[in-house]
Amino acid sequence: MNRLQGHVAVITGGASGIGQASANLFAAEGAAVVIGDLAEADAAAAAAQITAAGGRAVGVAVDVTDEASLAALIETAVTRFGRLDIMCNHVGGSNPRKDLDVVGLDLDEFDRTMNLNVRSTVLGCRLAIPHLIEAGGGSIINTASVGGLSGDFTQTAYGTAKAAVLRLTQYVATQYGHERIRCNAIVPGAVMTPALRDNLPAEMIEGIRRHNALPFIGEPDDLANAMLFLASPESRYITGQALVVDGGMSSHSTIAEIRRPS
Ligand SMILES: NC(=O)c1ccc[n+]([C@@H]2O[C@H](COP(=O)([O-])OP(=O)(O)OC[C@H]3O[C@@H](n4cnc5c(N)ncnc54)[C@H](O)[C@@H]3O)[C@@H](O)[C@H]2O)c1
């Protein structure tokens, strides 16, 4: 119940899916949580739900592609709760209808995807770091994707952007470890959230379930538990790492698929 007692966390994209589950869990473990989201009413509602349960939270409108907006979000954590210990750069995605193979993809969508996933994470890290140093250290958690681990026939921009998030995580870990700032990434596989339902047809989700080593699709809480571990002092000797939470989607090769007993 007290794994984050006295800590202050910012979670971007915290009004839905994995981000909201993490906000709820962090608050239940004693953290004060600043939920930043483009969907202002949803951010306020998510914070109100935490407050009603006896936790500490505030919902703030933010567009992570806008530096001033992201700076204001982080300032809210410091002015409302006095410090910043945990920064979750969680927003990401691309439009699968425009983010196609390398020849067919819309280049404006490529730029938008790099902005939404990579530039926003660079900004979130650089705006948070001075406050984390002020607090004597802290934990940055960046959200990547299994899409950033290998190639695919589509979503070229998304996979490229998430690969960049993984490498950026190592750069930040390297550069600020001496300030006791840890920086790790979570790498979700398929997770049942509104984004998954909107972007993947049901037959594709069923195909992933069959391909996973574990015979189910993950829920937001599965990722929230991984984020809690990376946020908490229990992971104090872990930095620059990518924690893959994918039901074993990336655990096996083509050969295993061919050998899979029917
Ligand atoms: N769900 C999955 O299967 C899955 C798999 C791999 C990676 N991920 C990653 O997890 C993260 C969140 O995914 P999710 O499925 O929980 O999404 P979600 O759609 O449930 O929630 C995303 C939230 O981000 C907010 N948002 C969107 N653009 C924003 C912006 N510019 N500024 C601020 N907020 C913004 C939305 O309003 C929404 O509340 C993303 O980085 C995504 O790439 C998800």
Image (spheres, grey):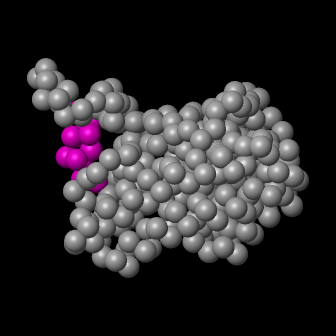
Query: Does 243 sit above or below residue 76?
Result: above
Residue at the bottom extreme, as displayed = 108
Query: Which quadrant of the rendered structure holds the C terminus?
Result: top left
Asked if 164 appears above or below 189 in the picture, the reply is below
Residue 150 image offset from top left, x and y in percent:
32, 47
In which quadrant is the N terminus drawn?
Answer: top right
Residue 31 placement (x, y as % from top left): 76, 41
- The residue lying toward the viewer, choosing from 237 and 193, is 237
Residue 205 is inside the magenta segment: yes
User: Is residue 201 in sight in this rendering?
Assistant: yes
Residue at position x 40%, y 36% in the image: 246
- Whether residue 184 sits left or right of residue 245 in the image: it is right
Which secondary structure is most common in the magenta stretch?
A: helix
What's the magenta region?
200-210
Q: Nearer the viewer, residue 210 or 42?
A: 210
Residue 196: give x, y in percent of width and height: 36, 51
Q: How many labels does the image show?
A: 0
Task: Give the x, y percent position of residue 71.
Answer: 73, 68
Q: Residue at x 28, y 51 (%)?
A: 151
Q: Is residue 142 above or below residue 43?
A: above
Q: In this view, does 76 lie to the left or right of 246?
A: right
At a point 46% along the width and 67% down the height, the residue shown is 114
Is-magenta flag for residue 207? yes
Tell me: 261 left or right of 119. left
Displayed quadrant of residue 162? bottom left
Q: Residue furthest top?
A: 261
Q: Is residue 246 above or below residue 57?
A: above
Residue 64 in the figure: left or right of residue 181: left
Q: Residue at x 84, y 39 (%)?
A: 6
Residue 90, visible in the rendered structure:
no
